[in-house]
Amino acid sequence: MTSSELWTRATAERYDAEETETSSAAVLGPTLAFLAELAGDGRALEFAIGTGRVGVPLRERGVPVVGIELSEHMAAVLRRKTDEATLPVVIGDMATTVVPGEFTLVYLVYNTITNLLTQDEQVECFRNAARHLAPGGRFVIELGVPPLRLLPPGQVAVPFDVSERHLGFDTFDLVEQILVSHHFTRAGDDGHYRRDNSRHRYAWPAELDLMARIAGLACERRVADWDGSPFTQDSTKHISVWRKPS
Ligand SMILES: C[S@@+](CC[C@H](N)C(=O)[O-])C[C@H]1O[C@@H](n2cnc3c(N)ncnc32)[C@H](O)[C@@H]1O
């Protein structure tokens, strides 16, 4: 039984329209190049493939992709784009669901490891990635660095977007390592805003490295973004690559 909140039909139907920036060529170009190079001549497994924002164009580049996705609603949107023979998707929890075959690449992008709300499940997710990897294969995660340097003592929230159509801020439970993202999104032009919350278990890069070691993987590379720029103490996100021994 996963701790992940289930993504609803309404969220799934809105997802692609709201993700125009993360679906742009400027974002997806370097993402797909990075992932395709690591997949090489092998197959790729996307944990939490969603509506196929990354998996569908990666498949179109010639990389065989399989997806695991918890929400039938998200998978149904993907299925309108490509058929099951071209891009198989298994409905299940990425921490425990096993699909047939070996992969040279398992990847989990867009902060989605944080949808698993306990440390145990995040460790299981690493173990599940390792289980699917061929010797020498890689597990890739894209994740924000927890924005705690922006949270001074006594302040309860950190805004991450204040724009015309969207107000977003995070609140924190520092004991449980839980972050709640609050979104107020303009719904139409009549002045109404829709309110949504999502819960996340944040984790530091070093904690992920330890989870990887528990799963038998070793950190090979950590960069600040898909373009390969160096990860520094000022980086707000990272792309990390762990390798299964050959
Ligand atoms: C931010 S979306 C990312 C979707 C896609 N990877 C992308 O980059 O656009 C998060 C996705 O994670 C899925 N998800 C959440 N918890 C999950 C779990 N335990 N196992 C599998 N998928 C999960 C959600 O249903 C949703 O589709």
Image (cartoon, rainbow, N blue to C red):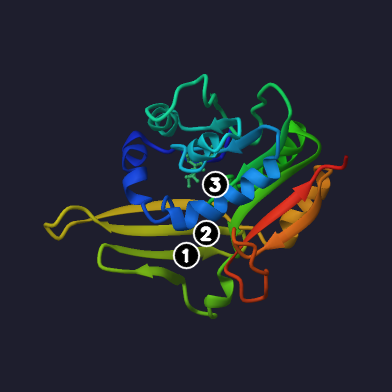
Residue 115's disc number: 3
Q: How many numbered markers are drawn?
A: 3
Residue 171's disc number: 1
Q: Is mark 3 within 8 Å of ligand 1?
A: yes
- Give amino acid for label 1: Thr
Residue 84's disc number: none
- Give amino acid for label 2: Leu
Instruction: Check contact, mark 2 vs mark 1: CB within 8 A.
Output: yes
* Residue at 26% over, 62% down: 165
| Residue 125, quarter of picture | top right
Which badge, 3 or 2, comes first in the chain's sequence? 3
The correct choice, above or below, for 9 with respect to 53 in the image is above
Classify mark 2: helix, strand or loop: strand
- Give amino acid for label 3: Asn
* Residue at 68% over, 21% down: 100
Q: Is residue 97 left or right of residue 200?
A: right
Residue 226 at x, y percent in the picture: 59, 58
How far apart are labels 3 and 2 at the CA level? 10 Å
Which badge, 2 or 1, comes first in the chain's sequence? 1
